[in-house]
Amino acid sequence: MPNWDPQQYQRFSDERSRPFFDLVNRVPDDEVHTVADLGCGPGNLTETLVTRWPEAQIWGVDNSQEMLAAAVKLAPRPHLQFVAGDIFTWQPERPLDRLISNAALQWVPDHPTMIPRLVSLLAPRGVLAVQVPFNFDEPTHTLLEETRSQEPWVTILGPRQRQFFVQTPTWYADTLHALGMSVDLWETIYYHVLHGSDAVLEWVKGTALRPTLSKLDATQQQDFLAVYGEKLRAAYPSGPYGTLFPFKRLFFVARWRSL
């Protein structure tokens, strides 16, 4: 996992928050007593769940100490607790009525093992709600791979390790159905209008670029950003209103089919 910078991540907080609310708005309401947000990041979105389910015990879970340090600075909320934990191994104190993960599972390998494990954490009327980026064939990613494959970066960075682990929509539908879940699954393309110089580069510096930057010293980082940034400016030209940045995301909300 990359070393996270909460301040950089939240530079585009309005745009990054929209998928979270679009996901949560499709989550059904029943009696909800336990909720977890896996990969909660700086916690600003997790704390909105207190308004949705004010009587529930809510856990925000993340394995980034930097993100958790930001989360614990938020104003204390009743029944809201931020805890250190890995998505693949964290175990709640009680079965979960709602398990939410927004823009986090793409970093976690072995979804064929992970998805059944997450389902196993649900209470009898539990719901699993997930959103992941689904834009890995867009210029932000293809140009990053192109830059990394050039010298001197291929020598400095070494062999490329797989970074994202998202499966196809059909795979999630088939897997969840086989586990006994009904599935509400959809895609959305957000056409964000970003403002500021090198806006798309600043966006990816908070997410997809983190693993690469973490392997470079300060001088190497600046050199890499100069090359990659030039490619991004050509792919995402700035206009008089800002920079148009398409971003596809995949969503699903799954609950036990017998209910």
Image (cartoon, grey):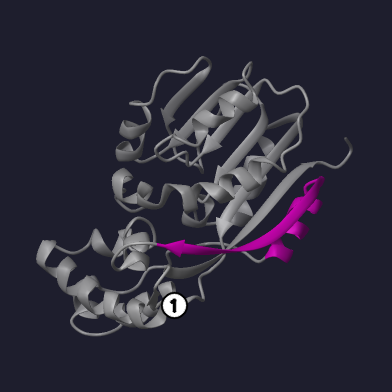
Is 166 covered by the magenta stretch? no
Q: Is residue 73 above or below residue 104?
A: above
Is residue 117 something that shows in the picture? no
| Residue linked to disc 1 | 139
Is 188 covered by the magenta stretch? yes
What residue lies at 37% left-to-right and 47% top-to-bottom?
10
Is residue 106 something that shows in the picture? yes
| Disc 1 secondary structure class | helix
Q: Is residue 86 above or below residue 157?
A: above
In the shown orientation, is residue 244 left or right of residue 251?
left
What residue lies at 88% left-to-right and 35% top-to-bottom?
259
Count of numbered badges drawn on the protein: 1
Q: Specify the quadrant of the image occupied by residue 56.
A: top right
Q: Position of residue 87 (x, y in %)?
A: 50, 42
What residue lies at 38% left-to-right and 79% top-to-bottom?
143
Q: Position of residue 175 (x, y in %)?
A: 74, 56
Q: Amino acid at mark 1?
A: Pro
Q: Specify the quadrant of the image occupied by residue 160.
A: bottom left
In the shown orientation, is residue 90 left or right of residue 232?
right
Give neighbour class at mark 1: few <14, some 14-19, many 20+ (Cα, 10 Å).
some
Q: Nearer the viewer, residue 116 or 77?
A: 77
Q: Position of residue 157 (x, y in %)?
A: 24, 71
